Image (tube, grey):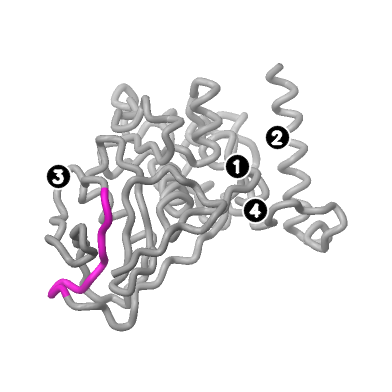
Amino acid sequence: MAYRQPREGTPKQRNGFVYNDRGTLLAGFLQLGTLSAVQYYRCLRMNLQTSDQEWRLYSCTEAGGVGRVVEEDETLLPEGNYMILGADGAPLDPEVQVTEEKGRFRVPTVYSTPTEWTTLGYDLLVTDEHPSVGPHRLDSIQNTILLRADLHYQFASYGWGVDPRSGYKITSFTTDANEIDGKELWLRHIPIDSPDRPLDVLFEDHYRQCVLKHMRGAGSEIMSNWDSQMGLGGGTSLNDEIWEGEKGKQALEYLLADKLGSAGDN
């Protein structure tokens, strides 16, 4: 089987690649020494659509053939090439499809856009009653984590994420944050039902966006942060029609908040 290489302009920070039986690249991963097979199976389920067919991950031999099935356990996933096949080792029919990516804004906290925040019902999950939470409860401490400046930027651009289902394990999706890969985000000192504790669902949403950005297909195109996550594309002009609609208004609000916030930090 001949493997297709990732297209130009995509992130190169991968050392694991997943294909279908025809050699089409479906997903990939960056193994920094902490990514387990069970964790990656869950990431693949976020990335792939298999029409409810039962499937397994198989290693590939040096000749491009099918190797051993990868068991869904805590064993570390070795670097290399892999293949998605049916549980019986046969090709899937219909073929596996890559999940369509849904963009998000760059996040200065865990989540930052009022429209999506309320649409998803996250405001209803906030139990913090402090007056500073604001009308949408978006400014609650439950939507905030305090980070070192460089880690904040990497978190905001989906360079690393926290998986509450794996004991708040940190996964780095780029080598820029490899120093914290595999560590635990320490929240044990805050009771699970405390109004001072960040919401698990927000970490889960952010983690999923990390997975979709870095593990699906050949990887996301390298664009500016807010361009790519708003779905505006690269090189957006102020004359484009996008600025005339609701998304344009949200974009302007985002840019003003981002720039004014940055100025206030200096």
Q: Amino acid at mark 4?
A: Met
Count of picture labels: 4
Q: Amino acid at mark 3?
A: Thr
Q: Is residue 32 left or right of residue 239?
A: left
Q: Residue at x 28, y 73 (%)?
A: 21
Q: Which residue was labeled with disc 3?
A: 75
Q: Earlier in the sequence, mark 4 or mark 2?
A: 4
Q: CA distance from mark 1 to mark 4?
A: 9 Å
Q: Residues within 10 Å of mark 3 (few under 14, many from 20)?
A: some
- Identify which amino acid the numbered label 1 is placed on: Arg
Residue matched to label 1:
106
Q: Secondary structure at mark 3?
A: loop
Query: Dividing the picture into quarters, in which one does residue 22 lie?
Result: bottom left
Q: Do the residues under discs 2 and 1 have CB atoms within 8 angstroms?
A: yes
Q: State the predominant SS element of the stretch in magenta.
A: strand
**Is residue 81 shown in magenta?**
yes
Q: CA distance from mark 2 to mark 1?
A: 9 Å
Q: Amino acid at mark 2?
A: Asp
